[in-house]
Image: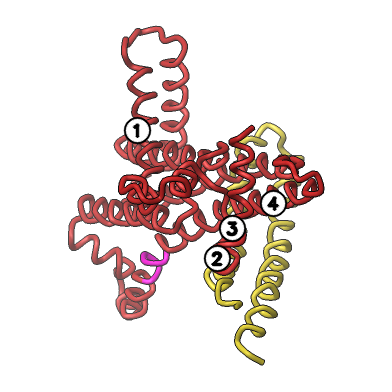
Amino acid sequence: MSLNLQLTNEIAHQAAEKAKEGTPELPNFITLLYDKFGKVAVIGFLHHWENVVFAWMIAILICFVAYLAYRKKTLIPGGLQNFVEMVVEALDNFICGILGPRGRKFTPFLGTLFIYILCMNLFGLIPVMKSPTSNLNTTVSLAICVFFYVQYTGIRSLGIVGYLSHMAGDPRDLVTWCLVPINIPIHIVEELARPLSLSLRLFGNITGEDVLITVFVGLGVSALSFLHLPVGLPFQLPFIFLALLTGTIQALVFTLLSTIYFSLMLPHDEH
Amino acid sequence: MSYQTALAIFLPLGLAIAAIGSAFGLGRAVSAAMEAMGRQPEAAGKIQLGMIIGCALIEALTIYALVTLFVLQGKIS
């Protein structure tokens, strides 16, 4: 009850504070701590690096679940190990369905990307938590990882000459050789636009959902403001479900597009 | 007209126009997916997956307009 009161006060306080700058945001436990004990150095540090702290928390949580699932490896799994193996197998089928059997060695990276982004997106729906993906820095760092891994895979599997010829559109006869000066800038811009679009799509969707939920929470609280009690009508409930759906879809789309970028970079005339 | 007034008028207007475009695109994509699912119900799973991904890509363009709004909305006073 007192947490609810604190949250309500926090919403009003932050709404007034952030009315001039930044998008409206629900308080999370770091901002609540910062509001109470702002002078303590540790809390100030945590508040400054809020998104990184949440991202680390989620990563450690996922590692912990994986550790729990594999403490005793049985051939016929049950319980948590079964669930985790189901997830891994579904991701493996999905990725190898696009990349073919050579996609097996990209499953760890792409599967982890999916699980991590899904957990980050859904984390913000827990009452005093925040999605790190609602900050552009997190999504850009994920997109840059994908970008560099794709280029590295291209150079590794095609060789330097093959990579450059892929950039120039694989010139074979006179017509394609003449089109090389057009193809190279187009390909470079396309390669650079990919991480841009990946990061902006994820950031925009998750921030949009968070802002929507925040606005409806504020609406619900102000609907009962005549009571002068720290309660509010739960107007944000349908939007929490919408955020569940779009969080999952955005994680899927990020992973799928990364997989497609891999399949476009690798030699795709084998099968 | 100060830049704040211009931003206040044209940012939501730009977002609304982007939303109209994506509404048309999404309507076409979903209707094509529904028709394909009706023709071949056993492929419904794959068609639905493709539809979701296509919808996310179409939606992304409106999201870019939304991101522009987030970036610039602090400047309206």
Residue highlighted by disc 3: A24
Q: Are marks 1 and 4 on the same chain?
A: yes
Residue highlighted by disc 4: A218
Depth check: A21 or A202 in front? Answer: A21
Above or below for A151 versus A244 = below
Cα gap from disc 1 to disc 4, whole angstroms: 32 Å
From the top left corner, tell me how far across and down residue A184 is, in percent: 32, 74
| Mark 1 vs mark 4: in front | 4
From the top left corner, tell me how far across and down residue A69 is, in percent: 38, 17
| Mark 1 vs mark 2: in front | 1
Q: Quadrant of the N terminus of chain B?
A: bottom right
Q: Quadrant of the C terminus of chain B?
A: bottom right
Residue at horizontal 53 percent and vertical 64 percent from the top: A22
- The mark that comes first in sequence, 3 or 4, is 3
Residue contact between numbered discs 3 and 4, judged by CB atoms under 8 Å: yes
- Magenta region: A189-193
Query: Label 4 is found on which chain of the structure?
Result: A
Depth check: A38 or A206 in front? Answer: A38
Residue highlighted by disc 2: B67
Q: Pointer 3: residues within 10 angstroms few (<14), some, or many (20+)?
A: many
Q: In this image, A104 relative to B33: left or right?
A: left
| Mark 3 vs mark 2: in front | 3
Cα gap from disc 2 to disc 4, whole angstroms: 22 Å
Query: Label 1 is found on which chain of the structure?
Result: A
Depth check: A90 or B10 in front? Answer: B10
Q: Are marks 3 and 1 on the same chain?
A: yes
| Mark 2 vs mark 4: in front | 4
Q: Pointer 4: residues within 10 angstroms few (<14), some, or many (20+)?
A: many
